[in-house]
Image (spheres, coloured by chain):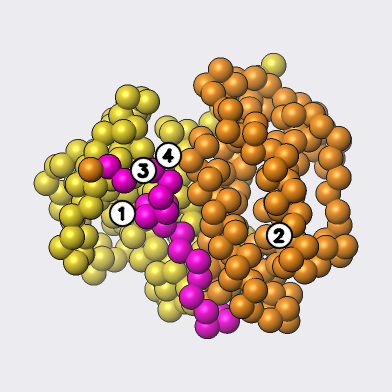
Chain colours: A orange, B yellow
Amino acid sequence: MLKLFEYNWQVRNEWFEWCETVSMEELMKPRTGGIGYILPTLYHIVAVEYGWICAGILQKEIHIPPFEEIMSVRQIKAFSDRCHAELAPFVRQWHEGLEDLVMIDVTDEGVEEAHQYGEVMRHVIAHEIHHIGQLSVWSREIGKKPVSANFIGRGLFPTPM
Amino acid sequence: MLKLFEYNWQVRNEWFEWCETVSMEELMKPRTGGIGYILPTLYHIVAVEYGWICAGILQKEIHIPPFEEIMSVRQIKAFSDRCHAELAPFVRQWHEGLEDLVMIDVTDEGVEEAHQYGEVMRHVIAHEIHHIGQLSVWSREIGKKPVSANFIGRGLFPTPM
């Protein structure tokens, strides 16, 4: 489980670096599909991971600043770093015994839904990779090479002899 | 590990159903980013999973038909089904003891590279989700709702009480 989170965190940080090479106009230009803008997609990825893990599983009081308050690459990267510092210890100590524990989520419609921790963790993993796939298309629209999506070759596994 | 493969297989089959509602012209229209076309993306996802698992890890002789030979939704779905039947038993019996086993991959440049099974399996998972994210953008370009990317709500985990 941890390795796919590490992959997402690494790829996300490379997208923040990529953003530094692109104008704010491009980052906030309306686009087709997904969240519809590059920078809000990165904000959304961070907020969703933070919400599911820290508020959902860990039942902590969390504050997610509105996008309008942190509307720059630097501030969203700082938001990502803060969330990461708060949730990474839980992800790092993940073990199979947590798979079937249950959390209660209250949907936007006020309905209570029970989810197993293992389901939530995989949801968060797939959520980020999916949205990053959308960024890769928008990147080509701007004429820029996207961040590599390869899992292999990132040093996530020590190279065997 | 298995749950994320099951997620990918489910989502992929929903994309094949989605393809049945779209003209061949749209499925083969050049698009920006990724593989550059909808139907070849699905073919590519299947071929990559099959290649890494059956040829790479299981060291089987495999045959991947050229795209031009199976250039229809029905035939690529059939190719996907065949590959799935061949590789699913391995994925289903995955266990932690396999994580660190090593396979040798020969790159297109003829270079031998060693990869741990755990790295290959996660590469395959992330690869498919990433490309599906691209399909979701192209789907909106056609004016169609994409297949849901949600992991939660697919019945992949039994609903807890």
Q: Earlier in the sequence, mark 2 or mark 3?
A: 2
The region drawn magenta spans: A141-160
Q: Amino acid at mark 3?
A: Pro
The CA span between labels 2 and 1 is 33 Å
Same-subunit check for callouts 4 and 1: yes
Q: Residues within 10 Å of mark 3 (few under 14, many from 20)?
A: few
Q: Secondary structure at mark 1?
A: helix
The picture places residue B125, in percent across and down from the top left corner, at 43, 46
In this rendering, which labeled residue sits more in front, label 3 or label 1?
3
Q: Chain of mark 2?
A: A
Q: Amino acid at mark 2?
A: Lys
The CA span between labels 2 and 3 is 27 Å
Q: Chain of mark 3?
A: A
Q: Nearer the viewer, residue B21 or B141?
A: B141
In this rendering, which labeled residue sits more in front, label 3 or label 4?
3
Q: Amino acid at mark 4?
A: Phe
Same-subunit check for callouts 2 and 3: yes
CB contact under 8 Å: marks 2 and 3? no
In this rendering, which labeled residue sits more in front, label 2 or label 3?
3
**Residue highlighted by disc 2:** A77
Magenta span main SS = loop
**Residue highlighted by disc 4:** B5
State the residue at coordinates (69%, 74%).
Answer: A27
Q: Which mark is residue A158?
A: 3
State the residue at coordinates (59%, 57%).
Answer: A12
Q: Earlier in the sequence, mark 4 or mark 1?
A: 4
Q: Chain of mark 1?
A: B
